[in-house]
Image (tube, coloured by chain):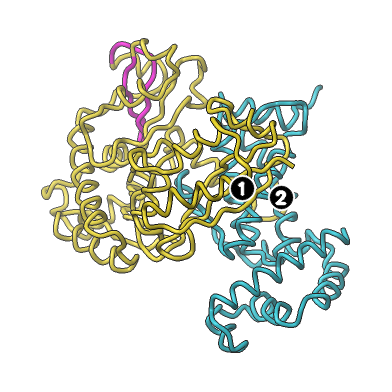
Chain colours: A yellow, B cyan
Amino acid sequence: MSEIPYVNRLGDELERAIRRPARSSRRRRLGLLALAGALLVSGSALAAGLLSGDVEMQAAAQVACYDGADPDFSGSVAVVPPEAGSAAVSPVELCRRALDPAHRGMPLVACGKEGAVSVIPGRRPSDCAAAGFAPLDPAYARARARVARLERRILAIETSSDCIARDELVHRIQRLLDRTGWTGWTAETHRLGTGPCGTVSGLGGDGRRYISHGLDAVGHRVLVARAAPRRVTDLLYSAERSLLGPLFAESGAKCFTFEGFRARVQEVFASKGLGATVKRTSMPRGTSLDDEDGRWTRYKQGCTVLAGGEPGDDSHSVVIDVFVSP
Amino acid sequence: MRVVTDAELILASRRDPARFRELYDRLADDVLAYFYRRVLDAEVAADLLAETFAVAFERRGRFKDRGKPGAAWVYGIAAKELSHWYRRQAVELRAVKRLGMTLPPLDDESIARIEALVDSDARRAAVASALGELPDGERRAVELRVVDELEYAEIAARLSCTEGAARTRVHRGLARLNRLMEARA
């Protein structure tokens, strides 16, 4: 424990985020409070199609995947967001994709526990109880479909323009919520992110766009953060259009000088109308690069390799970091 | 009883993410002090702390135990976050966002304790001395930003320059200040 209250609260929040699927009692209490409040405000809420708090939270939440190696399920192996705007891929299938290939063939079953969905080794819903979970509520599929519809509508608003100012996006999403029966939900600005635009969705490490982190089913909020224009983030990180991916591979396949690689980076981004500033950055002590693409070998040979990139301060440039051997 | 090393905790957190909290509890105060000494702003230091541990959690799978202290790996991430801040004058809480974290508010007691992490009097004297070595334009820009907490637009107005130039002066001034302080540490 720290003597600094903020440090302890941040630690609690970090732990909550790490263990979100398993730590749901507080979420459940808050969810029930929120649901009770919503019912007080609108007695017709349930009749209008609002789902029970736990199932609604499950439908918006990420899925915790376990491979069974940990008998008390104290830590998940993977936490996977649902596919943005889709209810077609079940929690079991999401986890099957995420687990280590050696475990993908094992039978899996989806369980629910308060506001979380967990996928564990098993053949039937009764296996959930044996592991301390509950069978997944049959209403989950319907709830997930409803959340997916909302996600699709939000994504449609986002993709209608390369850049929608954050406050404008909040306004448009609030109108969407009001119009589509999401009683008690509000669109709010979120302090995270930088850039002139707003976004609810974000690109995951796999280059796919996810939205679940922007939906707060406990507080009934859609969170709109700041972001760079969508075209810039897509050209940096998206699975389909990323320019960084090929550059990672290129810097592992060929030995570049700093000047040579800078010219190559600027050429690649200029072809898409973006300026690129290339910055030298030092490799954090005690770390190395995965050598699947050969960058670690190149780095050790004294070559310049790509470290990463981010949007620039304006709307039409990027900042690219490279590692240069000392 | 053998004490689990930081490196072992990082490795253990791959299988059991909850172990990452132990690593955080061990290092958070020191990492926070590391940031505060360099940015002299408790809010910024607190945000950098959050992003550093969120990044570390995400990247724990890439950590390779080569016999070096695990803390050095975390400080490496911290150094990179710090360099981003020097460059952009903003903490990009991307990993925090990806993890779905909501940052807690920074209360007055925490601010006071963060400031107390550093030997304030000696630090102030060192900073004042280092500030005196900055070029006039950079020193004034840093003072307006850090001491007077002005927005860049207002700094620009006071220095009769563009907002971009004001940002650049603050950025360069803080980076130079950091180098001077590091040299004296």
Sooner in the amino-acid sequence: mark 2 or mark 1? 2
Q: Position of residue A7 (x, y in %)?
A: 64, 52
Q: Label 2 is placed on what type of residue? A: Val
The magenta stretch spans which residues?
A108-124
Report whether A324 appears left or right of B125: left
Residue B154 lies, with reference to residue A324, above or below; the image says: below
Q: Nearer the viewer, residue A126 or A108?
A: A108
Q: Which residue is mark 1?
A: B52
Report whether A260 appears left or right of A47: right
Quarter occupied by residue A107:
top left
Q: Which residue is mark 2?
A: B31
Q: Residue at x 67, y 67 (%)?
A: B41
- Decide: marks 2, 1 in contact (CB < 8 A)? yes
Q: Nearer the viewer, residue A43 or A78?
A: A78
Chain assignment, label 2: B
Disc 1 secondary structure class? helix
Q: Label 1 is placed on what type of residue? A: Thr
Identify the mark at residue A233; answer none if there is no mark.
none
Which quadrant holds the C terminus of chain A? Answer: top right
Q: Position of residue A146 (x, y in %)?
A: 18, 42
Callout 1: few (<14), some (14-19), or many (20+) C-alpha neighbours within 10 Å? many
Is the same chain shared between marks 2 and 1? Answer: yes
Query: Quick check: is A116 in the magenta stretch?
Result: yes
Which quadrant holds the N terminus of chain A? Answer: top right
Q: Position of residue B47 (x, y in %)?
A: 59, 57
Report whether A123 appears left or right of A7: left
Separation (CA) of disc 2 from disc 1: 9 Å
The image shows a total of numbered marks equal to 2
Q: Position of residue A288 (x, y in %)?
A: 66, 32
